[in-house]
Every structure is written in structure tokens, then in C-alpha cells.
Amino acid sequence: MPKDHGIGASPKRREDVRFLTGAGNYTDDINIHGQAYVAFLRSDVAHGRIKGVDTSAATDMPGVVRIFTGADFEGVGGLPCGWQVTDRHGEPMQEPAHPVLAQGKVRHVGDPIAAVVADTPEQARDAAEAIEVDIEELPAVIDMKAALKDGAPKVHDDLTSNLCYDWGFVEENKAAVDEAFGKAAHVTTLELVNNRLIANPMEPRVAVGDYSRATDESTLYTTSQNPHVIRLLMGAFVLGIPEHKLRVVAPDVGGGFGTKIFHYAEEAFCTFAARQLARPVKWTASRSEAFISDAHGRDHVTKIELALNGDNNFTALRTETYANMGAYLSTFAPSVPTWLHGTLMAGNYKTPLIYVNVKAVFTNTVPVDAYRGAGRPEATYQLERVIDKAARELGVDPIELRRQNFITEFPYATPVAVEYDTGDYHATMDKLLEMMDRDGFDARAAESQKRGKLRGLGVNCYIEACGIAPSNLVGQLGARAGLYESATVRVNATGSISVMTGSHSHGQGHETAFPQVIAEMLGIDESMVEIVHGDTAKTPMGMGTYGSRSLAVGGSAMVRATEKIINKAKKIAAHLLEASEADIELKDGAFTVAGTDKSVAWGDVTLAAYVPHNYPLDEIEPGLEETAFYDPANFTYPAGAYACEVEVDPDTGKVTIERFAAADDFGNVVNPMIVTGQVHGGLAQGIGQALLEGAAYDENGQLLNGSYMDYAMPRADDVPFFQVDHSCQTPCTHNPLGVKGCGEAGAIGSPPAVVNAVVDALQRAGREVTHIDMPLSPARVWAALNG
Amino acid sequence: MYAFDFEKPGSIADAVAALKDEDAQALGGGQTLIPTLKQRLAMPSKLVSLTGIAEMQGISKAGGEIVIGGATPHAAVADGVAGDYPALAELAAHIGDPAVRNRGTIGGSLANNDPAACYPAAALGSGATIVTDRREIVADDYFQGMFTTALDEGEIVTGVRFPVPEKASYMKFEQPASRFALVGVFVAKYADGVRVAVTGASEEGVFRWSEAEAALSSDFSPAALDGLSVPADGMISDLHGSGAYRAHLVAVMAKRAVAAAG
């Protein structure tokens, strides 16, 4: 019998009522009396020298309040990078300046040159079009390998080259890895592209800056996954506003997927301009603007080699990856191809020797940063593709090859610096086999063949590192931020509870799932608990939501704070019951003296805390409010096994996904319905990457698919009814909830399953196709079939 | 968008008069024009809406032909001709999404002549007659290349007359992002021969595939198209497929259309 409340129950998402009835409060819904509007004039060339910006005609146009250019930001800080990577030689990465408005040069199509503030959005746009910009166009560098050649045009004139860093991991292992390759019985090599993606959250980015002359306080309303991080980065590094004079609010946010983690120029601009003009300033991105100003994701070019011995055991792994940074370093960009990618190259396997080389490259393209999975999808894709290729080369079952190399003993220290606390990869593979009906595949393939279709089956595993932390470790790795999370549990006088969390919900269902945890601990109804998030004025300093960390890190902070509440409430109850604190039990929302029928209700205890007439004032303070900051001991390591069955139409190259099964181990699960939904969304995005999406630049740096007319997002009919299971549960050993995180798994595990399945379909049809680069569009698959 | 004047006349005559102003632009369902205006890629002085003109609405039959008013939305065509011309109804039912089908009009689509639109294939494949405020134009004369038609400045498509074939079918292979036709082939069998019209593929817009028409006129079966192909030269080549791929798809979709027509 499934639970109907608390941990493990699936109450419907309470936030959906307002989202689905049009009552959400998104940043664009925030309108402040007297606000002006911003239009950015953006570069339409990928690389050029700014010879002049003439705003004279535009300034006199109707409604124009003021026009800002790069010159207005001289002396103002640039956008900071939050992670410093150290290269193979012990040198820090090359870190270029990132001005709020372009100074001297433009470096990608979409780079903001000037900003018009006007009374209406139309007036701002009219005036922006009237600004005359004299740009000397320079040759653009788009291809990463070309960008590293001698004599290539430099994106940043003051850097020595377009190389951000050349990272080796673990550098000390390189010689041993090379030696192992020399002794290998078999080596499988694969070159592949992890395609550049554009996140496309349903809600485009919006920023509203406000300033009070009365209090000298600035407020920024913004579409962010982490308002405290924005407050810290923008306040301390860009605008020089101390925390107590700067409030950042991220209200309802319509999807983030990583691209709303970062601190963007438009946020700093609106905050800056509001102070300058003493007037609220609002910017709402158009979808076209989002395509050329939201940070993109992925964009790796990789060569991976897998060495095996005569028994088909993996003996070594070696990779060389080119990772596109785009024109500037977005907030966490350097960490994605390194610490979120290299550390996961062991996957689910006990490969003893691994060497990962990553060259991060500046190009004249939109900056690239974390996107759902961030580094881990890139690691999983190349690893699971090369294992699949190895199985075919060796003529062995791809599932058995994986199984014989599984890590089976935990904790397990990988050769790439992380320690998996727990897992059971055979269990998820067993569950997958049960779900996918492998035995029925041949019959389904025969049926497909009757209809002229080629059927294929792809299987893969994945592991990810979630709940990103601990702070002291990431600090050693170059993070310029801590990665704890915070929670304040405020019990009100009548027993209702407000939980202020540093986590931020932008679709995850926190307002439903977090109360389940609190209610379970206290034995009260979930409806008594409200979650407050997204406002630096209301919540303790927290790091926000990304990396599937909210429940594992933020939820753990709530547990710690609630434990403090329970301890104090027991003291109050003991006093009220005239019993010893050690004898007080909390059960079903009441405090009882063990072994007796003496009890006091939750609400009586909470009332006593705020009306302390009969209260142990000599021992404890009145009130019932506790805060905890939780910094985890390790990452969590969700893992799983995925299977995909496709049909390929050999006449057109079109791939359809017929079946998809996902067996995940997320540790303990708080709300299975929400987890299933998270997996569904992740799978859709992973399938989008595998079949449909891929930002394409021409050689001049023009984005060829900067609208939905050409950039293909997955739609409901592109995906099948998913089979999703998360009953395999090895609880995380180091957080109090035993949870691991589920937000990114689907996007990490699914692309290799799809590509493995398509290659399988083609090979079963006798085609010598070993790889097709994503997206597997009909045209690409047809070309592979007819190549 | 830029500011413009707006008129919604109640008759064709008033619409024609309103369109005489310099830079005035007719507005059908706006499914192409409104996004274009939002992108500031057009700057008409005045929009003249054609959706308030009763005589341009609706579907009727006359002399063995189906007559569709120029301002009739796709959804109304999908419903209205399902019995008399199911292939045309099916085509209309799969244009865009519900919003497009309930706003977009047949006259607007034909006047725009997007090289990947569906209606041009139906009109050319059916040998339809395009009726304007001042004349009638047979489809073979009407389509003159990508986004180009025989329409004069200010001329309005007031209706379209479709001869009803014995058999017909439209097969569309969708471009993955826009879901416009990457290649769409309309096949229609009439007593005097077969017509095959191809959209989405050519740099010249919709065209008739005459070799296929000849083959199918003597043998209306998919096998009749074996070995026939259109040259890749002149086919659109872009992110979504090369000219060779599109040329290949023309033959595939043509066969499927013949098979579906039965």
C-alpha cells in the first residue's frame, strides 16, 4: 500500500495550481510604477573592432531616457568567472575580461554593444535601431581546432592564444595509462562530437532593476536558479554594492536547465541603470535574443580510446577533448569540461587507469556553460559509446561486457579522484532487463521488418555526481564559491511552519516535496508547511539549485534545522508535561511521555514557545526557529541502466523511438511521482539532443538555427511512453535522507542509448556504420545508410 | 513591430480600395505576416484585414469543382471538404498546429507561396484556379518561384477552385524543427491524367514532376515510379538536408502518395 503522506507518498504538486491556471508570478509579471524599458543593441557580426558608436540621433528620439555604451561601464567591474581551472603545467587558465557592454571589440553575434532605456519597449527598440555603430569586421574563429592553430585570429587580443587551458587528469597517471595501452589486447577508438545545445527554457530571461533613493537599496528581480549567488557575484565583483543594500529576487521561474545559474550582463545592467536613473528598469528577452545571449551547453569534440585485456576487462581509458568556451567565460564554464566531466570518466566500471585531457577553447560564439547534466552527459556519452563499439568489435554482448567490468564493491575510489559511496549496478541492469523485454526484441524486429523498418536496441549505463559539494573539496579544485545549502525552519505560534530555503524551484516541485520531509519528521500534516525561496531578503544565504542538489543538500539542511526544532520542542514539552526530556517522544504530531498516556499536542508546544507563560525561561529562549547550514561530505552518485528501441525508416532516415526503459537508483525517494516526472523531462531533453537539437554556426559565426523554425526542440510526439523505475535504491551513505538526486539523470543516460540503438539497427541491416554524430537527423541517418 | 494603420473592410471592393495606399499590405490569418512584423522584418504603412469579408469565407461546390473562399481558415477546409476531397482535407488538417489552422487562410498561404508550404502543392497538383479580385489564374501560371506569384500589387486571392480528382493523396516529410514540408508531394489522378506537385524541395518553389506524371498516367501504381528521380541540382540544400537528400525524398514521398491514394 503506497503511503498517502510524508516521505514516499506522491501528493500532487501544489504549485501546479497556480502555474496551470495562469496565476504564477514570473519576473515579467513584476511591473513597478514608473518603470522604463531596456533594448539592447547587439552585435550582428561574430568578431569586430568597434570604431565608433554614434548615439546622437537615437538620443533625441521619443521616450528615450538614456543610452548607455561600453564607455559608461569603464571603472565598473566585468562579469566574474566563478571557477578557476589550473592547467597541466600548474598554471591558471587564461581568464579574459567580460564587460557588461562591449568595450573595443565584439566577440560573438549577440554581444551587447549599447543599451537604450526608454519609456516604452517599442521606443527603446526604435532608438536602438537608430544607433549607428561603426564596426570593422574581423575574421571569426568558430572551429575549435582551427582556433588553436598558429596565426588564428585571437578572440581576446590580450591573451596569448585562444586556449583557455590544457587540462590533464590525472596528469601523474598519464605515463601509466600510455603504458597500459601498449600492452592492451584490444583497443577501441572513437571520435565523436557532443553537439552544442541551447537550453530554451519556456520562460525567456527577464531582469527588473529597482532602486530606492530613500534607503540606497537596490533590488534585482531576475530569472535565476540561485539569487544569492547573483547577489554575491554582481554586488561584490561588478557593481560594488554590499549585501545589505542589495536584494535579489527570483520569483516563479519557468525552467532553468542550467542556463539560469549564471550571472548575466543584463542583470548587472538593469541594476546599474536603475541606480543611475533612480527609476525602475526592465528587460525581457525575446526568444530570438535568448538564442544568442543565453549560455549554450555541451559542444565537445572528443577522441576516446578504451584498452582491454584478453579477458575483455577494461585496463585503461584515454581521452582527448576540445571543449568550447565561446567568446567569454560564463560563470561556471571552466568547471564543466573538467571537474564535472573528467571525474566521471570511470563511469560504472573498474577501469584502473584513466587519463583525461581537455583543451578549452575560446571561439567567436555564444559562451558555453552548464546545461542539464553539465559535463556528466559528455562523459557518459563517450564512455558508453566506446564500450558499445568495443563490444561489436569483439563480438561480445554489450550488456555482458558492461557487467563483467562493473564496480561491485563500495565505497570505491576511482582513478579519477572521486569515491563512490554506494551503488548496485547489477541491480539496475537486472531491473532494466525485466522492463525492456529483451527476449521479445526479435519478434518486434521481425514485425518492423514487415513494415520495411529497421529495428535496433541500445543499452547503456550511467553514473553521475550530484549534490555538488563539499565546499572544501571544490575549493581545492578551483571553485570560488562554497557549495553548502541553508534552511531556516520557522515554527509559528499556532504550529504552522515556514521553511526558508536557499534552494530554488524552477519546475522541480520543491513546494510539494520539501513539506513531505518536514511533515514526516514532525508527524504533522503537509499543508501546515510552506516553502519560501527565491528572495535574498527572506532566506538565509544559500547556493541555489543545479546539479541535482536541492534535496540532497538543501533537504539535508532542512533535516538538520528540523532536528534542532524537535530538540527544543521536546524541552518545552517536557516542561509542560512535568517529565524528563529524555522520556519525551514525538509521534503523529504529539509529544508523549514514554510509557504513559500523558501527551501534549504540537500546537500547544508551539504556542507555549511564543506565549511563554508556563515555560522554562531559565533554560531556553522563547520562540521556535532554527537555521542550519549543511555542507555534505561527498557528492552523491545516482546511477542506472537505460534501454532504447528505435525504428529507422531506411527510405527517409527518420528515427522513431518505439520503447524506452530507464532503471535508476536515486537512493531514497521522497515523492515518486515528481521523480518520475523529472526523469521524463530529462529523457525528453536527452532524446532531443540525440535526435533533434544542435546549434549550428556558419564559418562567419552566424547562428544558422536561431529560431524554432530551424532549431528543433523535442515535442510530445517525438518521445514514446517511457518505462521508468526507481525501485532499486542504495541510499546515499552520507546525507541524512539517504537521497541522491534525480534531476539530470534522464538527460545524462539517454543520448548514448538512442545512438547505440540506431547504430544497432543499421548494423543488423548489414550496414558498416559504427557511429553517427548527434543529432541523428533523418538526413544524417540517410547519409550514413547510403554512405 | 513598427506602428501601422489597420483597416478591416467588409467587402472585396473596399479591401481593394484600401490596398491602394502605398505600402499597404493585405492581412489574412497573419500566421506568417505577424511573426514577420514582430521581428521588424516588414514595415507596412497599413494592414488591411481580409477576415471580415463574408464573400471570401466558406466552401461551396459548383460545376464539379470545390470553391473555397480565400479567407477560409485551414481548419474549416479540413472539416468542409473531408467528404468531397479527402486528400485536400487531410493536407489542411496537418498544416502547422491548431492555432495556425484556425487563423491561417488558404488565400494567405497561396499569396505568400512559401517554398515549403503545403497548399501550393495541393493547388498545383489539382490544377486549381486561383480567383482574385480582378481575374482568374490557373495554377500552372500562378506559381512563379519561391515567394513569387502572378499576383499584382494589391491583388487579393478571393477564392480557389479545385477540380475534384478520382484519387489523390498528399505525403509530407516534415522538417524536424518547423514541421513545414522538407519535401511534400501531392498526387492527383484525373480522368485526363495524373498531376504530381512537389513542395519544400526546389529552390524555385512548388513544381510539377512531369516524368512522374507521365509514368503514373499510364500506370497509377508506386512501381510505375521505379527508377525515376528528380535531379539534385536546383534542390534546396540546408541544415536539414542536402539537395541530393531532398531529391531522393521526392521519389519516396511520391511513391507513398500513390500507394496511399490507392
Image (spheres, coloured by chain):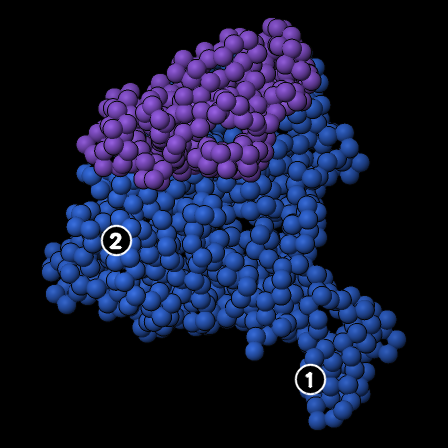
Chain colours: A blue, B purple
In the rendering, at what x and y percent does residue A179 appear? 14, 57
Which of the pair A384/B107 is nearer the observer? B107
Q: Residue furthest bottom?
A: A595
In the rendering, at what x and y percent does residue A490 appear? 73, 64
Name the mark on residue A449: 2
Element at label 2: helix
In the rendering, at what x and y percent does residue B44 appear? 59, 13
Asked if residue B134 shows in the view, the reply is yes
User: Which amino acid, mark 2?
Assistant: Gln
In the rendering, at what x and y percent does residue B185 appear? 36, 31
How many numbered circles does the render carry? 2
Q: Quadrant of residue A699?
A: top left
Which of the pair A564/A75 is nearer the observer? A564
Location of the N terminus of chain B (image quadrant): top right
Residue A695 vs B155, above or below: the answer is: below
Check the residue under mark 2 and report the chain it is in.
A
Residue A173 vs A407, above or below: the answer is: above
Measuring 29% from the left and 57% from the top, which residue is drawn there? A447
Whether residue B226 sits left or right of residue B147 in the image: it is: left
Few, some or many residues within 10 Å of mark 2 (<14, 14–19, 20+): some
- The residues bearing labels 2 and 1 have C-alpha atoms spaced at a distance of 65 Å
Instruction: Check chain identity for marks 2 and 1: say if they share one.
Output: yes
Measuring 26% from the left and 24% from the top, which residue is drawn there? B214
Q: Which residue is mark 1?
A: A585
- Earlier along the polypeptide chain: callout 2 or callout 1? 2
Check the residue under mark 1 and report the chain it is in.
A
